[in-house]
Amino acid sequence: MKIKFRLLGAVLIIALLLAAFYYSKSGVGLHEERPIFGANDKTTIRLWYTDDALTDYLTAKVVEYNQKNKKTRVEIECVSGLEYLEEIGKASVNGEHYPDVFIMTHDGLEKAYLAGLAGEIKNPEFLDDEALGFSDAARNAVTYNGKRIAYPYYFETSSLLYNRTYLEDEVRARKQAEIDAAEGEAAQAAADAGEIVGEDITQGDGSGEANESGDGAEAESPEEVTVSQEEVDQGVRDMLPTTIEDILLFADNYNAPDTVESVFQWDVTDIFYNFFFVGNYMNLGGASGDDIGTIDVYNEDTINCMSFYQQLNQFFAIDESAVNYDKVLQDFIDGKTVFTVATSDAVAKIEAAKAEGNCSFNYGVTTMPALNDNYKTRTMSVTDCLAINGFSDHQDMANEFAQFLCSENTDACYTMSGKLIAHEGIPYGNDSLASFVSVYGNSVPMPKLMATSNFWVQLEIAFANIWDGADVNDTLKTLSESVKLQINGTAVEEERLPDATVIITEGQSE
């Protein structure tokens, strides 16, 4: 019996030594808590995210990935968004259940990169694959110092939302007015011709009787003319504004129904919905928002654009104290406005209202109009991306999983979470969603410079002051000097530029 126990003990010792040798060769140690046994010998990698709306979708994707992949087993965890990067850093340094991949907004990538929590992705040319269709906005969002340090996953941006039913009704009304006017002119011409013929008859024989051609007979009633749906569709396309001045002109000539309280309304208190006014001319950090040497806030174009913005207050008197995005969107759903600026979440909210019987009209999304013929617009965007933890011991596997997620080619992400994938070609089956994807491709990614993190608060204040009548030139000059002081640590005196020259002449105050 003693010999058997000794032999059994020797076998156990040999097994433990072999296990230790396996662990040392596989690289699993204190920095790894990876289940080996009971998981088909797969290596576990973890994904962290903060938005619970993604849970069902990510769970389905992980199940799909785990079934197909023979080497990797993925686990997901929804964590608090408070001090998100700090918590990732702590877990990574301590080697405690840290994420190999995590989802974050792209504007925090500089901070993640400098903390060692995000590094250059494997095969960065993956984002240039034309079959996937990543836009410049998507690639710029994840670029830092010339390196692609994350994968663009899904996005948010804003564009112009319009009440299609109102526009269709207006097209029909204007078409009918044209028809009525043409018929009126024809009737008047016929009446004038009848008077001339009557005079000729009287002068000829004095009888005053009608001639054989039927002059003097009772006129026939004109046939009712209907406007075809093709004509209506074309009319709506022609009526969609290409400039904000077009909206003002529309308001001048619009015979609004009683339900309409304002032709155009948007949240003037939120920079995300205001930024398009200066987005094409205000440069903070270059195309990728990472160049500390490129700060161009105060220039003649931004002065003119902000002057245009200020002048809109006399046409669309929006009370800052009584407006916010939720109210603006609800007013649109209730049919109180014709045009508004909205983010992609508006589509789901309108569809839900229609399903509940609380919205009876059709709607659409179109490209954000220019200000006028001289000044273009660009909206701001935020891209949520997949970053690879620089502390992960499974970089290749983490990259493979991230590529799998951002290669989504169905509308499942939107239907299950309400998120729009950050590349083209997704069959959403909804023109409005496709419009948001198109707008995103030309958007300005929010800069990722840590040194200018509070710039957006300052810009929002500047917009509010200008809307209320503050001097545009002085306000932008002060803003520029403030941001440069924050970056350089020394005061900068900007040379004062000429005042604005743009003047809105179309439209009347509502």
Image (tube, rainbow, N blue to C red):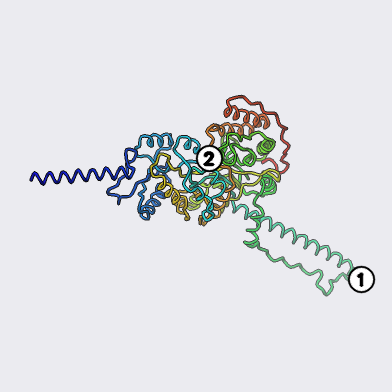
Disc assigned to residue 53:
none
Tag 1: Cα neighbours inside 10 Å, few (<14), some, or many (≥20)?
A: few
Label 2 close to label 1 by CB (< 8 Å):
no
Which amino acid, mark 2?
A: Tyr
> Looking at the image, which residue sits at the far bottom?
212
Residue 237 screen position, x and y as percent? 64, 55
Asked if residue 267 can be seen in this view, the reply is yes
Residue 362 screen position, x and y as percent? 56, 54
Disc assigned to residue 204:
1
Residue 434 screen position, x and y as percent? 55, 53
Vertical comparison of 468 with 164: above or below:
above
- The tally of labels here is 2
Corner quadrant of residue 82: top left
Is residue 505 toward the left or the right of residue 229 in the image?
right
Tag 2: Cα neighbours inside 10 Å, few (<14), some, or many (≥20)?
A: many
- Closer to the chain start, of discs 2 and 1, is 2
Q: CA distance from mark 2 to mark 1?
A: 94 Å
Vertical comparison of 231 with 350: above or below:
below
Which amino acid, mark 1?
A: Gly
Is residue 100 toward the left or the right of residue 378 in the image?
left
Instruction: Kindly state the secondary structure of the residue where label 2 is placed.
Output: strand
Corner quadrant of residue 102: top left
Mark nearest the camera among 2 and 1 is 2
Asked if residue 382 can be seen in this view, the reply is no
Residue topped by disc 2:
144
